[in-house]
Image: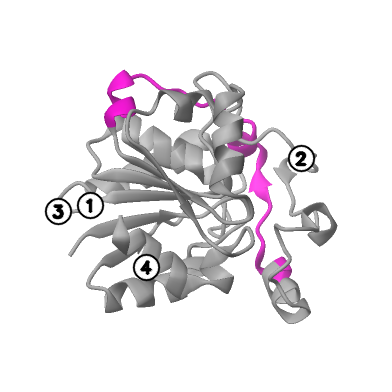
Amino acid sequence: MTDIVLIGGLWLRPEIWGDVVTELAGLSHRGVPVSLPGQGDGNAAADLDDQVDAVLTAVDGCPKPPLVVGHSAAASLAWIAADRRPVAGAALIGGFPVADGEAYADFLPIADGAMPFPGWAAFEGPDAADLDQATRERLAAEMIPVPEGVALGVVRLHDERRYDVPVTLICPEFTPDDARAWIAAGDLPELAKARHLELVDLDSGHWPMVTQPSALAAALAAI
């Protein structure tokens, strides 16, 4: 059994991983969803350091180095964990780690001290193509505004041994060829330096833990 630490992206509660955890258990692995401060616990004053601490606590609670999984913007949280702790590997779902000194998620408006979910119009196209109307309404109702201190927090990376950590980029709404082109163009500098990078195609939109939990669990178990 491998422990698989699961970190949701912006606006997501840890419960988003429920179906994936069930599927992983059937594959003899333990899914460990991380409850990120500010995303479901009512802590509107949470900052990026608080979320990093929560991830590291989850990693430290595993009996052996886990696979750390980051979805979307939380690819950076998974990468920070790989920078600060021994981990078996990092899996990044539909997202890319930002470089040292960059803001965690400074790409949507802040309102009243938080970054609210902008609505589905911002994700029309491949991101949300596999979400039916009922699922969109349910997810939108569950989304939690991300505290400003998280969204605008500065990512800090310290240990270049992170580049030796095996990294799997799971490509849902984009293809592995797309990712290779972005790496070649210099758009993803942290992944460009990774010495053990695998790209895995997944036929889904941006939230495969919702629309393709079995396929996502199988991809993680294969790692």
Residue under numbered circle 3: 63
Query: For the magenta stretch, what is the residue range?
Result: 140-164
Residue at (46%, 30%) from the top-left corner?
191
The C terminus: image quadrant = bottom left
Q: Secondary structure at mark 3?
A: loop
| Residue shown at the point (33%, 26%) measured from the top left | 163
Is 161 magenta? The answer is: yes
Q: Mark 2 or mark 4, which has the lower sequence index?
A: 2
The secondary structure type at the circle numbered 4 is: helix
Instruction: Using the numbered discs, state the Cα–Cα distance from disc 2 to disc 4 in whole angstroms.
Output: 32 Å
Given contact means CB atoms under 8 Å apart, are the residues at marks 3 and 4 in contact?
A: no
Which of pointers 3 and 4 indicates the residue nearer the eye?
4
- State the residue in front, 197 or 121: 197
Q: Earlier in the sequence, mark 1 or mark 4?
A: 1
Figure colour scheme: one colour
Mark closest to the chain's N terminus, 1 or 2? 1
Position of residue 30 relative to residue 189, above or below, is below
Which residue lies most toward the front here?
Answer: 177
Dot label at residue 218: 4
In the structure shown, which secondary structural element does the residue marked by tag 1 occupy? loop
